[in-house]
Image (tube, helix red, strand yellow):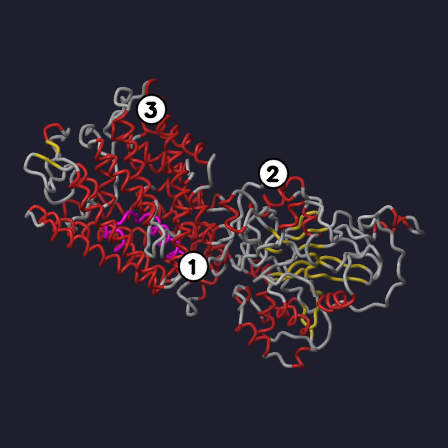
Amino acid sequence: MTGSRDQGAVQLSLSSLSSPPGGESQPAMTTTEEEQSRGLAGAEPGPPAPPEPECKNDDGVEDPESTTAGGGGGIRLLEQPLLKRSTTLTASHLALVGAKVSHIESLDYEIIENDLFKHDWRSRSNVEVLQYIFLKWAMAFLVGLLTGVIASLINLANENIAGLKMLQMVTLVRQGRYWAGFFYFAGANLALTSVAAVLCVVFAPTAAGPGIPEIKAYLNGIDTPNMFGAPQLIVKIIGSICAVSSGMDLGKEGPLVHIGACLANLLSQGGGEGRRRWLRYLDNDRDRRDLITCGASSGVCAAFRSPVGGVLFALEEVATWWRSALLWRTFFSTATVVVVLRGFIEVCRDGRCGMFGEGGLIIFDVSDVAVRYHVGDLLPVTLVGVVGGVLGALYNHALHQVLRLYNLINAKGRLPKLALALAVCAFTSAGLYLLPFAVPCTRCSGAGAGEQQQCPTVGQSGNFKQFNCPDGYYNDLASLLHATNVDATRNIFSTGTAGEFRLDSLLIFFAIYCVLGLITFGIAVPSGLFLPIILMGSAYGRITALLLARLVRIDHGLYAVLGAAALMAGSMRMTVSLCVIFLELTNNLLLLPITMFVLLIAKTVGDAFNPSIYEIILDLKGLPFLDAKPEPWMKDIAVGELAAAKPRAVTLQVVEKVSTVVEVLRSTPHNGFPVLDRPRPGVSELHGLVLRSHLMAVLRKRWFLAERRRTEEWEARERFSSTDLAEKARTGSGMMDELDSITPEEMDMYIDLHPFTNTTPYTVVETMSVAKALVLFRTCALRHMLIIPKFQGPEVSDEFTSFHISYCGDPYKAGPEGTQHPCCVSSSGKQKESTLKERSI
């Protein structure tokens, strides 16, 4: 038997019309292979046909016209298979098909329209339909509610833990006990980092990092393992609090997105095996995907208090498949988050929650600032966008190299992971504590402090930290470094303070955060990329305003906002969602035109150099991902050519022998199998596609027939329900144990597959270009796609062709193994294709 051996691969190409057995137009195959293929398909062996004269060209490929020279040439031509198999590939791109296979399973987002599913929907009453709709909206509400509560508690914890740490450190510095202040500051940071790192390394390794690339892969159709469970949720919450409070250059925005996705996944599961019966409606990949999309939107909203921005973030950055009903539910979730956050702000106003207040939720509010544009502002604003795109691309490239090095270190075991996290924390603590001593103190009279701003600031949050300076002076670098990342962002975004920060202090701040941003991301703690990039971008925005002071007419604080937006667009390549997020942060519509202008320039410049940071991380993690844009060469290759380049797929008959099904499951890891039917002798047709999980469900319940016959509709409904078929198929030893439990007597019995077969699979004609099939495959969120012949003849061949997908592109999509070429149309056990990986269908 031929076929790929990758985990969960699906072979889905439908060959065309068959020629008589033994005919020369039949694809080349040894006698043993032919017998095995027919045995697996359940076909009855027929008498051998007389040999046909060979008609081949010099290159060994048969000439279709030559085969029609004999009698019945027209019929003979119709009987030739359209999907010809040749040992010679006609295009260089085909040589890479099947070179690398990902062993990560895909998700079944497609609706499986078999007889049981159709009966289930027809039998549902109006009450059950309303219950299903209400359940989806109720889950969206719960996701938003819980995400808002958890985000508020995380903000409260971060503000108080980091605030108490800073107050004690400043007290020691004011007493002249500099070394005591350093050891206290570094020791507290190391203790917090140790808690976060130990939790990630020991209990939930997948909770490290932001989690956004994994969510993006999941919504693209990849079943990212161990990403959205209860351990990941708990570790993400506690680890995020400790990591952010330790003062390292990371944010809580990415972890909040992951937390929202974990909540959505746990709610969709209904709490495990003992869930109530009415939760069965959400026990499928399709509804779980929609709920996780709501969770991701709620996480962004909780981080920036931006409901519309959260919805657009899910639409632009993480979601592959979208529809209007999902848009309403995600907006409902983000609206719930905003209400919860606003409630916490009111409760904690005036210091009733310790040091927690608006600062932890609202980064920047310039609703009272009048923004006016002039023609002379175009040059510096354009420069901000161009520099942001270049710096974003450089940051992506440098971070790519650092993460490759970290992968080698983290692969050595738990202790190297912990040591790396603690080393980064120690370096960060030393830099944040010692660098303010390197800049001179600034007199408060020339700082631009308003009447409502105390200068110098002693103790809690403020723009003018006194630190080691005498009365009447402040340390501008300490105002940025000796604060939480949120407070530092609010300080550098502050308006009306053009003379607050010195140029040398801003250069030091920008340099140290560039270094910290590169070495911090990738260690074994929950971390986000948003705030580190915002801090770097705001610093270079202020630097640009100072260097071009004669040309700048806009407030320096607004230049910091534009710099942050430009660097984020240059690194993450987001535009619409970023624009709305910054608009909701600033609460000033007058910033909209200039922000859009900067974002478009930065993204265009960044795209000219390398992919977005999330695409690079996906590649490094080895997660298959199907890009939205086909490669140019895909338009020149038909899907039939790709199918012809791979081994035949395994097919089943509508009524199949138990032993054949067991052998197929044992010997192939494919997720789906084409099912053929012969309604009358000499006529064969494609009946549909049956999933591996459904075959396992049939074997598990021992639904066998003593004779070869088609069952009535009521027979399958007595033993199976749609809930039974929603269970995932076991793999590994669990599956083998179930198969081994089948007795020899049961092996000789039969299974009627027609109640379980999806009779409406997506099919494409063999002449369709790979580019067009790729768009269809990704747009419809498919896992399987069948290739059928263009011309229909007397009988469809029961020999299917395995079809593989691989990727090509720039070095970021190929990795160290070399460049790969994308040819994606169908999926297998792994739904979308990655630059390093490929799938068979």
Foreground pick, 367 / 252: 252
Range of residues picked out in magenta: 242-265
Q: Earlier in the sequence, mark 2 or mark 1?
A: 1
Q: Secondary structure at mark 1?
A: helix
Which residue is depicted at the point 33% across and 41% down?
533
Residue 255 located within the stretch drawn in magenta = yes
Residue that carries the numbered disc 1 in the rendered image: 268
Q: Which mark is residue 632?
A: 2
Q: Distance between the Cα atoms at labels 3 and 1?
A: 49 Å
Q: CB of mark 2 within 8 Å of CB of mark 1? A: no
Q: Is residue 167 above or below residue 276?
A: above
Q: Quadrant of residue 652?
A: bottom right
Quadrant containing the C terminus in the rendered view? bottom right
Q: Residues within 10 Å of mark 3 (few under 14, many from 20)?
A: many
Considering depth in this image, is 469 or 331 the residue closer to the camera?
469
**Secondary element type, mark 2:** helix
Q: Amino acid at mark 1?
A: Ser
Q: Which residue is mark 3?
A: 380
Q: Residue at x 59, y 66 (%)?
A: 694
- Closer to the chain start, of discs 3 and 2, is 3
In the figure, 505 relative to 206: above or below?
above
Say whether residue 322 is visible.
Answer: no
